[in-house]
Image (cartoon, grey):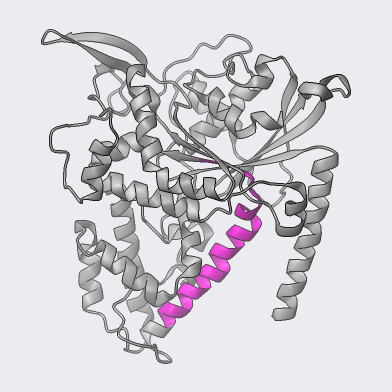
Amino acid sequence: MVISSLADSLVRGVETIGDTVSETFFEPVIRLGVTGLARSGKTVFITSLVANLLDRGRMTGLTAQQEGRINAAYLQPQPDDTVPRFDYETHLSALTGPTPHWPDSTRAVSELRLSFKARPAGLLAGLQGARTVHLDIVDYPGEWLLDLALLDKSYEDWSQETLTRIETRAEAAEYLALVKATDPSGAHDEPTAQALAAAFTAYLNQAREAGFYDCTPGRFLLPGDLAGSPVLTFAPLVLSGPSRRKTLQREMERRFEAYKSQVVKPFFRDHFSRIDRQVVLVDALGAIHKGPQAVEDMRRAMADILSAFRPGRNAWLSQLLLGKRVERVLFAATKADHLHHTQHPRMTAIIEALTREARDRANFAGAQTAALSLASLRATTEEMRRHNGVELPCVRGTLLDSGKQAAFYPGELPEDPAHLLGPARNGADSWLDEDYGFMAFAPAHLTLKPGDGPPHIRLDRAAQFLIGDRL
C-alpha cells in the first residue's frame, strides 16, 4: 500500500507539472470553485454567471468587457470526463422559460468549461493578439467541504464534540435518547448500527431545516450512490475508553475512518485541491430571520470552511513544487434583491463581520479576499410605501408559495453588525428589539434584449474580483 500510494502521488505530481506548464505557456485555465451551504443559491449563481458571461450587456463591472477586450465567449466540453457536466441549459430554461421556477439544488460535484477569446491589457496588448482563456467552474455542496475538517479528528474526538454541541438542541432529542440506551462496548449488531445512523441522519436533516449549519458528515445529507453503504452507517456515541474487537464502538470507529479515507480524501484529491479561485455563497438573510443561534452557527461554519482551503498566491514555481493554492476567495451574501438597495451596504457590512475570522486567516496566508452582497438573478423590483405616516423601502415580487404579487418590508438591518453578532455570540434565543422578516420570491418573468444576460445585482463585480485579472 505504501509503494502504491507513493507511485500514485508521483504520477499525480508529474501530471500537475505538465498541466501547469501547459496552462502557463499556452492556454491559461482558471478553476473556480463554487460552494455554499444549503439554499444559498449555488445553481442559480452559476447559471446566471455563465449566461451573463456569454451575453455581457449587463457586465459593465467586468473590466475586460468594459474595455472591449473580450472578442467571444463559448461553452466547451469540460476536461474531466468522469465528472458530470453542470446542466446549464436546463437550469437556464427553468429561470427564463414561460413558467419560471428555481432549479434543483446542488447534490453532487459537477463542472462546466467556459472559454474566452480575449486580448491582453497593458503593454502586451500591442504585441500579441487575442488568446484563449478557459474558466472551469466546479460546483460542489458546501456540506462536503465541511467534511474536510474531519480529516484531523479521531472518532472519539468527533463523537465527543458532536454530542456536546447538539445536547441542547430539540432536533437531537430522539437521537440522544437512543445513544443513552446504547452500550458502545457491547457486541456489534448491524440493526443497532443502522438504527443509530438513521436516527443521526434524521437529526441532521431536521437541524439543517431549523437553520443550523454544522451538519456533518455531509454525505449523510447528500448520500448519492453511497446510500445504505457501511461507510455511511456510523454515528457518534458516548465513549468511556479504548475500543475492543468486535464491539459496536470498534465497528463505528472503523467506518468513521473509512469515511475519511474513501469519501473525504478522494474528494479533496480529485476536486478541491485543484481549485485556485473560490466563491462561498451565504444565505445570511435566512440565518438572520431564523435568529441569533443560526447566525452564530453560520459564523462558525464560515470559519470551518476557510480552514479547509490552502490560501495563498499561485506563483508559477510554487505550483510546480507544492501544488495549487487558493489565491482569491469571495464571500457573497445572496438574495440581495430581497432588500431595498438602501439596505445593501448594511448587508455587506454584516457578511464582512460574519466572515472576518475566516478572511483574516486567508489574508495572512497571502490570499486576496472580499465580501459583498449580490443577487444572482433579480426577482424583485423596489418601491416606497407609506405606512403610519412613514415611507418604508419595500421590494415587490411574486410570492413563491401562492404565486401572488406582494410588496414586502423586511425590516431595517442594524448599521453596526455587532448588534447582530453580539447576541449571537452570547447565545441569545431571539432578537430583543427587532423582528427581521423574510419572504421567498419566485423568479420573475423575463424579456431579455439581444446581448443581455439575466438581471442581477453585483454579479459583474463578483466576476471582476474572481477572474478579471486573468482576462
Residue at the extreme right: 127
Image quarter where the C terminus lies is top right
- Answer whether residue 226 is visible to the viewer in this image: yes
Q: Residue 322 versus residue 199: which sits nearer the camera?
A: 322
Residue 397 shown left or right of residue 58 in the figure = left
Image quarter where the N terminus lies is bottom right
Q: Residue 296 versus residue 446: which sits nearer the camera?
A: 296
Residue 163, image quadrant:
bottom left
Residue 140 shown left or right of residue 167 in the figure = right
Q: Considering only vertical position in the picture, is 280 above or below 9?
A: above
- Name the dominant secondary structure of the magenta segment: helix
- Residue 174's x, y, as percent? 21, 65
Residue 205, image quadrant:
bottom left
Q: Residue at x 72, y 24 (%)?
A: 73
- Asked if the stretch drawn in magenta spans residue 258, the answer is yes
Residue 340 shown left or right of residue 431 in the figure = right
Q: Considering only vertical position in the picture, is 463 above or below 225?
A: above
Residue 243 shown left or right of residue 69 in the figure = left
- Residue 16's x, y, as percent? 77, 55
Residue at the extreme front: 364
- Answer whether residue 119 is visible to the viewer in this image: no
- Asked if the stretch drawn in magenta spans residue 328, the answer is no
Q: Residue 226 versus residue 205: which sits nearer the camera?
A: 205
Q: Residue at x 27, y 16 (%)?
A: 394
- Residue 375's x, y, as percent? 44, 26
Q: Considering only vertical position in the picture, is 360 above or below 266?
A: above
Q: Considering only vertical position in the picture, is 75 above or below 310?
A: above
- Residue 85's x, y, as percent? 64, 42
In the rendered structure, which segment of residues is drawn in magenta?
251-279
